[in-house]
Amino acid sequence: MDQAAKKKRSALAAVSYIDDGMTIGVGTGSTVDFFIDALPDHAHRALSLVSSSERSTERLVRLGLDVTELSAVGDVDIYVDGADEATKHLHLIKGGGGALTREKILAGASRRFICIVDDSKLVGRLGRFPLPVEVIPMARSFVARQLVKAGGQPVWRRDFRTDNGNQIIDVRNLQIENPVELETRLNQIPGVVTVGLFAHRGADVLLVGAADDVKVMT
Ligand code: 5RP
């Protein structure tokens, strides 16, 4: 079974968490695209949808679904999103698609964060995938120097602008022994908008699509 089929399997498993009248946060990425594509079948269930990116909003709208602003709803009942890496502690690296800031907002606003991944994303320790950091453009070089001091190797994601008009630095070679502590530390650097570590608010449920089944980790 290829990776896309495993992604689809985990995304479709997330559909079973939908209940009538829910407000659903919709993440971003190729795994979430499978979840989005399943939503029209549930349009009759009076769902409110909040999106984490222009990309996901466009896909939802193309399918005839309404997208609501986060500020127009209360708490988000479930937030469904992918990840670039995940551990058994449900700590994540996210932001490969550059949507990390709105993703972190929706994760924070949600009662239940359901993370959908294929089994290649499951790791013993975070950090093989370069850690995305969204920065205010004028602070990019300054932040990059601080990231070197933190032991990383920052690489500017050129020709990319986030939905918020900011830039992304991908940090390689970080030894992420303690994701909660590192998230706190990197968040203190002036000019950092969002760190792609989701440890303070990790997932509540991790659905891991594999060749033979979907593993549910809580
Ligand atoms: C986007 C993300 C995505 O969830 C992450 O990059 C995983 O993407 P994919 O489902 O395409 O593998 O964090 O900012």
Image (tube, helix red, strand yellow):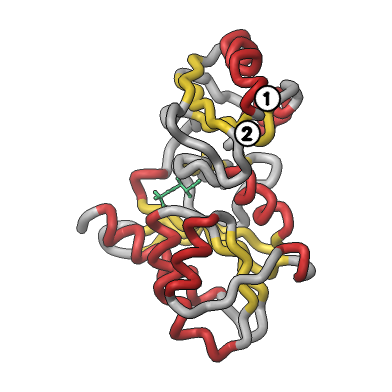
**Which residue is at a point 40% across and 44% down the rendered structure image?**
121
Q: Position of residue 185 (x, y in %)?
A: 71, 23
Q: Position of residue 213 (x, y in %)?
A: 33, 64
Report helix, strand or loop for mark 1: helix
Q: 118 or 39: which is nearer to us?
A: 39
Vertical position of residue 119 compared to residue 39: above or below: above
Quadrant housing the C terminus:
bottom right
Q: What kind of residue is marked 1?
A: Leu
- Label disc, if present, on residue 186 of the rendered structure: 1
Respond yes or no on whether mark 1 lies under 8 Å from ligand 1. no
Respond yes or no on whether mark 2 lies under 8 Å from ligand 1. no
**Do residues under tags 1 and 2 come within 8 Å of each other at their CB atoms?**
yes
**Within 10 angstroms of label 1, few (less than 14), some, or many (20 or more) residues?**
some
Report the Cα–Cα distance between label 1 and label 2.
7 Å
Name the outermost residue toward the left: 1
The quadrant in which residue 48 appears is: bottom right
**Which residue is at a point 52% across and 64% down the rendered structure image?**
57
Q: Position of residue 154 (x, y in %)?
A: 50, 18
Report helix, strand or loop for mark 2: strand
Q: Is residue 165 left or right of residue 184?
A: left
Q: What kind of residue is marked 2?
A: Val
**Which residue is at a point 51% across and 20% down the rendered structure image?**
174
**Within 10 angstroms of label 2, few (less than 14), some, or many (20 or more) residues?**
many
The quadrant in which residue 84 appears is: top left
Q: Is residue 17 left or right of residue 122?
A: right
Quadrant housing the N terminus:
bottom left
Vertical position of residue 86 compared to residue 34: above or below: above
Vertical position of residue 195 compared to residue 20: above or below: above
Q: Position of residue 56 (x, y in %)?
A: 49, 61
Name the residue carrying label 2.
195
The quadrant in which residue 92 appears is: top right
Which numbered disc flags the more N-terminal residue, 1 or 2? 1
